[in-house]
Amino acid sequence: MSETSPRLFIVSPHFDDAVFSCGALLAAHPDAAVCTVFAAPPEHQMHTEWDQKSGFASAHEAIHERTLEDNRALEVLDAIPLRMPFRDSQYADSPSIGKMAAMLEETIYRSTANTLLMPLGLFHDDHVRVFEACCEILPRLSHLVWFGYEEAIHRRTPGVVQARLADLAQRGIVATPAHPSAAHTIDVQRRAQLKREAVNAYASQLRAFGAGNYEDVFATERYWQLSVGRRAKK
């Protein structure tokens, strides 16, 4: 790694979301930070349907193995993993939006990032909660460059992207189709190759989605530049 403090900072609800949705972008940004919000195991041992589909006997085993998968994927993309001590909703945890926002803001301040990427919060409850936390801090960090990314797989749900864009307008956040510039030169084919290698590191999640149900992760990545504008009148 050429730098310990990245310039690109991607907020990822779960271990795989940043790579599934932004892997080609990460391939062009060595030393980017990927901050996973829901990265902690449940306080007590438990089993969930998703973890069982992923091939795990327990939640603790799932988090342990998924962390290793994430390490391998981010190593392929030369990205820096950052992890927050929150648990996702399948473990019956629900940290407050304010608490997540405060910790995210502090983590961003400790980096030298000047470009922030947040999920649009499509379909999945955990993604929506992370989106809300990011919206809370965006106006306070409006001097930075912000992008929203369309979450792979979830963006296929009819109407969810359009509904989110309308919601952003009501919040006074202007969303413009755009793509973050590349940090260094790497051809499109090489980016795609690195992303596919990184995606394949999440073997447990691909198993849970099932063959043919995750091809959207290899489709074109889509981004929206976000800026604070005037709140729409009701």
Image: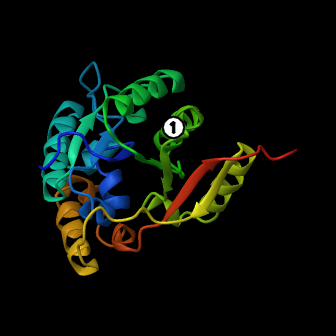
**Residue, x 20% and y 74% (percent of image)?**
193
Residue 176 sits in which quadrant? Answer: bottom right
Tell whether 174 sits left or right of 233.
Answer: left
Q: Residue furthest right?
A: 234
Q: Is residue 205 above or below residue 130?
A: below
Residue 209 visible from this viewpoint: no
State the quadrant of the C terminus. top right
Tell whether 134 sits left or right of 34.
Answer: right
Which colour scheme appears in the figure?
Answer: rainbow
Q: Is residue 98 above or below residue 206?
A: above
Q: Nearer the viewer, residue 3 or 211?
A: 3
Circle 1 — which element?
helix
Q: Tell me the amino acid under the disc marked 1.
A: Cys
Residue 181 sits in which quadrant? Answer: bottom left
**Residue, x 52% and y 35% (percent of image)?**
141
On the image, the x and y values in percent for residue 182 come to 33, 65
Q: Nearer the viewer, residue 158 or 37?
A: 37
Q: Nearer the viewer, residue 122 or 36?
A: 36
On the image, the x and y values in percent for residue 121 come to 53, 48
On the image, the x and y values in percent for residue 37 come to 36, 35
Find disc 1 in the rendering and name its residue.
134
On the image, the x and y values in percent for residue 222 come to 47, 66
Residue 47 visible from this viewpoint: yes
Counting the numbered discs, the total is 1
**Residue, x 21% and y 50% (percent of image)?**
31
Tell whether 179 sits left or right of 24.
Answer: right
Which class describes the residues within 10 Å of circle 1: few (<14), some (14-19), or many (20+)? many
**Residue, x 25% and y 78% (percent of image)?**
187
